[in-house]
């Protein structure tokens, strides 16, 4: 292995996990590198949590093979794997104090008492819960429990940390704050984080790379910018952000080919009918059918004929909600650069 | 809205009563608790008080009449004799053994029901656990008499396995042994465990059902082998259920007088002593004094149980 290519933390080779007829994970191939913040993104039931549980060892693959730092994991129970998990419901031990919860893994490894004490204190400081050692989990808020679960996993210095929708139960403000903190902690400790989420914004914010799951298969793997800017399937284009999928006659009018392509709503500009543009631009006239004012921007639904709506998002540079709503029913010209069209496969 | 208010007829009686209770929450609380309070106050506490009072009277051995004078004579001269303390000790130790054995048998089954059984199997197991409670207790005890008898199916089966020597050796053990299983303290113990087992299974199952699967997974994830997880996570979290179940098995064994009367070596349990003293002997004060002992034991037991969190598991 050369110095440039990072070492592989987890390699999944043709992994299947079937529950009866349900193919929760279906012929999965995936490499996750050491020190990476990697997200498994997908709707519920897409197999992302099963994938995480396969890595943790709570599930065994029906077929295929999982390597953890080059070691085959078949038949290795969870308690022999050098990974730790932050559970969706936190799974704190209700009969133990916060300190005992965080110390649990170290107690099992028979780390000396004084060192346990030191590491627990240090870890609680890192997750910004200093001095809460003697509280019971029931006395903590949701956000605090989340931090305890994180501390309990990280204190063991695992080589890989698995996070199963850890921010799902938090309210929006707290979630955004924790996203930043988690990312900062990951960069500080340098551990591989594998993060399961159904929230595409969260995945884009935090990940070095991400995999988009659908029906037990991976649709696309890439950096957030790659996945967002160059979705390769209709599912990815629709799930990661919003996209206009344009096909059939409308596609033919615009590009001369009926192949489906996607175009992001924010790449489209609303122009005055009659303006002319160069060959590098797509232009189509339509009628504003609906206006959704979102404060920071406004979403317009523009009917362009053949029963096709194109969604356009415009910054509210000068317009206020009154201007936005007044534009309903107006004839407009939609203009965007052809380079932003993404031809899709499998649509 | 205004027209509706004007045209509305005066509220009906049920609505007026409802409104009265809404405005007077103390009255509604009183109405709620009147019947149970009467029942508990008059019949339950009343009889308990009468019992306690009786135990401080004494029977005049010469006239055979009850002397209604407060004193500790019944306790001192009649209850605290070596023979009677033998009965108390036998009852207490049997109740303890029955409780421990029930817990040991109930826990794996309750664990299987809570963790592994499919929805259908779990329903079937609930049914099987509760099914014996549908039939008469007396019938089931007499059935065991036949099963455990010298010529019974169990002895026949043990002989068939070629283990008759083992059975003989067990029955030769003093105190718990006897001529046959149906005439031994061991037989009494077996039937007690059978009869009270459902009362142990259900609370343990309820406690285990409340332990999230993820908590058990988290323990393994943090490096704990299954045995460690059981000792440090599963057992402590299910413990209130075990204690709750033990309240039933222990107190029911402590008070029972039918099972040791039918199956056993005719040495008394507390319940039988009470039965004989108040019935045959007509010594109500001694019978009452005998009854105070399990009440006292259970009072201490319940205090310990509350401290162990058992009442959260019921």
Image: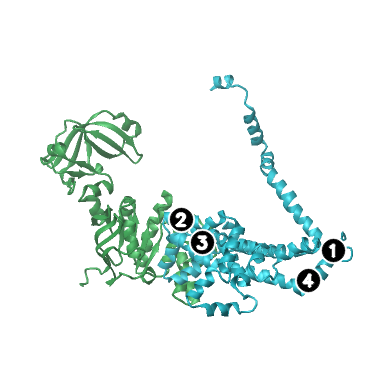
Disc 1 designates what residue? B58
The answer for how far apart the CA atoms under marks 1 and 4 are is 14 Å
- Confirm or deny contact between disc 3 and disc 2 (CB under 8 A): no
For the point 27% across and 35% down, the residue is A301
- Confirm or deny contact between disc 3 and disc 4 (CB under 8 A): no
* Chain designation of label 3: A
Label 3: which secondary element = loop
Quadrant of the rendering where the N terminus of chain A is positioned: bottom left
Residue A116 in the figure: left or right of residue A344: right
Name the mark on residue B124. Answer: 2
With respect to residue B259, does B161 lie above or below?
below
| Picture colour for chain B | cyan
Residue A83 in the figure: left or right of residue B248: left
For the point 29% across and 54% down, the residue is A21
Disc 4 designates what residue? B80
Chain painted in green in the figure: A
For the point 78% across and 59% down, the residue is B52
The answer for how far apart the CA atoms under marks 1 and 3 are is 53 Å
Figure quadrant of residue B101: bottom right
* Chain designation of label 4: B
In the displayed orientation, state which residue is furthest to the front. Answer: B151
With respect to residue B223, does B9 lie above or below?
above
Of marks 3 and 4, the one in the foreground? 4
Disc 3 designates what residue? A94
Are dots 1 and 4 on a single chain? Answer: yes
Figure quadrant of residue B49: bottom right
């Amino acid at each position: 292995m050369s110095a440039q290519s990072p070492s592989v933390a987890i390699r999944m080779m043709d992994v299947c996990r079937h529950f009866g007829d349900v193919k929760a994970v279906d012929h999965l191939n995936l490499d996750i590198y050491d020190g990476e913040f990697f997200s498994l993104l997908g709707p519920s039931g897409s197999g992302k949590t099963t994938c995480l549980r396969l890595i943790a060892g709570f599930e065994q693959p029906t077929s295929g093979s999982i390597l953890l730092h080059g070691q085959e994991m078949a038949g290795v129970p969870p308690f022999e794997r050098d990974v730790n998990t932050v559970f969706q419901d936190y799974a704190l031990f209700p009969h133990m104090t916060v300190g005992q919860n965080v110390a649990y893994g170290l107690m099992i490894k028979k780390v000396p008492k004084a060192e346990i004490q030191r590491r627990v204190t240090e870890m609680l400081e890192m997750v910004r819960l200093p001095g809460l050692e003697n509280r019971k989990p029931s006395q903590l808020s949701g956000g605090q429990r989340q931090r305890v679960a994180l501390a309990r996993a990280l204190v063991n210095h695992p080589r890989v940390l698995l996070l199963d929708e850890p921010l799902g139960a938090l309210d929006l403000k707290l979630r955004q704050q924790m996203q930043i903190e988690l990312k900062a902690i990951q960069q500080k400790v340098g551990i591989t984080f594998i993060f399961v989420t159904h929230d595409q914004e969260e995945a884009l914010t935090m990940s070095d790379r991400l995999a988009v799951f659908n029906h037990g298969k991976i649709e696309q793997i890439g950096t957030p910018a790659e996945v967002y800017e160059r979705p390769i399937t209709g599912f990815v284009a629709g799930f990661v952000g919003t996209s206009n999928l344009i096909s059939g006659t409308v596609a033919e009018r615009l590009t001369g080919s009926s192949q489906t392509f996607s175009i992001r709503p924010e790449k489209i500009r609303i122009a005055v009918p009659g303006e002319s543009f160069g060959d590098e631009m797509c232009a189509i006239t339509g009628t504003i059918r609906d206006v959704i004012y979102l404060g920071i921007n406004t979403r317009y639904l523009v009917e362009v004929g053949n029963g096709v709506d194109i969604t356009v998002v415009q910054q509210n540079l000068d317009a206020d909600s009154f201007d936005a709503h007044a534009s309903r029913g107006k004839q407009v010209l939609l203009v965007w650069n052809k380079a932003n069209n993404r031809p899709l496969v499998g649509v | 809205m205004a027209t509706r208010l004007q045209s509305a007829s005066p509220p009906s009686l049920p609505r007026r009563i409802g409104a009265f209770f809404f405005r007077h929450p103390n009255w509604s609380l009183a109405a709620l608790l009147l019947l149970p309070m009467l029942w508990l106050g008059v019949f339950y506490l009343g009889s308990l008080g009468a019992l306690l009072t009786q135990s401080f009277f004494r029977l005049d051995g010469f006239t055979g009449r009850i002397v209604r004078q407060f004193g500790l004579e019944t306790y001192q001269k009649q209850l605290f004799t070596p023979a009677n303390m033998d009965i108390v000790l036998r009852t207490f130790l049997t109740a303890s053994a029955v409780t421990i054995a029930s817990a040991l048998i109930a826990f794996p089954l309750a664990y299987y029901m809570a963790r592994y059984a499919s929805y259908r199997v779990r329903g079937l197991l609930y049914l099987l656990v509760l099914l014996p409670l549908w039939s008469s207790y007396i019938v089931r005890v007499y059935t065991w008499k036949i099963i455990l008898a010298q010529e019974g199916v169990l002895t026949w089966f043990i002989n068939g396995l070629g283990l008759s020597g083992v059975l003989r050796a067990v029955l030769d053990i003093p105190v718990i042994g006897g001529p046959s299983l149906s005439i031994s303290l061991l037989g009494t113990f077996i039937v007690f465990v059978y009869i009270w087992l459902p009362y142990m299974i259900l609370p343990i199952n309820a406690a285990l059902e409340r332990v999230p699967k993820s908590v058990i997974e988290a323990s393994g994830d943090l490096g704990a082998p299954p045995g460690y997880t059981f000792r440090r996570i599963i057992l402590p979290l299910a413990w209130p259920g075990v204690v709750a179940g033990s309240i039933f098995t222990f107190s029911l064994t402590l008070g029972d007088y039918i099972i040791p009367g039918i199956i056993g070596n005719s040495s008394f349990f507390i319940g039988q002593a009470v039965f004989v003293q108040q019935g045959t002997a007509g010594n109500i004060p001694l019978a009452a004094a005998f009854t105070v002992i399990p009440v006292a034991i259970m009072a201490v037991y319940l205090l310990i149980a509350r401290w162990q969190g058992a009442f959260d598991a019921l």
